[in-house]
Image (tube, helix red, strand yellow):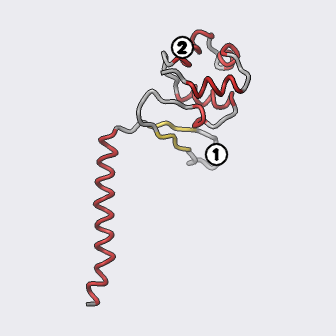
Amino acid sequence: MEKNRLIGRRKANGFSQSMVAEKLCMDVSNYNRREKGQVKISLREWEKLADILQVPIEEIYESDDTQVFICRDSSTVHYQGTNNIYSVPEYLLDTQRKYIEILENEIRELRTEPENRKS
């Protein structure tokens, strides 16, 4: 799948494919295949592209997968701007939704329990 957001931002910044390829230390044909979606762009490459184009990774990132979460990693004292990309399968999300629903029901029951004792 062609990376239209990346292409649009690159052109808006006035960069040619060869300029970006040079900054990524690869030849133009390799970079071209990434923009066309023929070769998957690694997380490290997405981070470098965001840095080159001076935009947050969320602005240019387009996944080949259907579900992707981009989370800021601020676990260190100094924020490094590191972005982690996680792909979570739908069955795991369904399991978590069911668990959350059970917990919400338990919370509601616990909140009404003190009222029942007063009666």
Q: Amino acid at mark 1?
A: Tyr
In the picture provided, is 47 more to the left or to the right than 108? Answer: right
Residue 17 location, quadrant: top right
In the picture provided, is 37 more to the left or to the right than 47? Answer: left
> Residue visible at 33% across and 50% down?
96
Q: Secondary structure at mark 1?
A: loop
Reply above or below: 118 against 49. Answer: below
> Residue visible at 41% across and 33% down?
66
Residue 34 location, quadrant: top right
Residue 40 coordinates in the image, percent (x, y): 48, 21
Residue 28 coordinates in the image, percent (x, y): 62, 11
In terms of sequence position, does the residue under pointer 1 or pointer 2 come before the other?
A: 2
Residue 42 coordinates in the image, percent (x, y): 52, 25
Q: Secondary structure at mark 2?
A: helix
Query: Seen from this angle, which residue lies furthest bottom?
Result: 119
- Can you say which quadrant of the picture contains the C terminus? bottom left
Q: Amino acid at mark 2?
A: Arg
In the picture provided, is 35 more to the left or to the right than 91? Answer: right
Front in this rendered view, residue 38 or 87 = 38
> Residue visible at 47% across and 40% down?
69
Residue 115 coordinates in the image, percent (x, y): 30, 84
In the picture provided, is 49 more to the left or to the right than 38? Answer: right
Between disc 1 and disc 2, the foreground one is 2
Q: Which mark is residue 12?
A: none
Give the residue pinned by disc 2: 33
State how far apart marks 1 and 2 are (Cα). Answer: 32 Å
Give the residue pinned by disc 1: 79
Query: Seen from this angle, which residue lies furthest right?
Result: 14
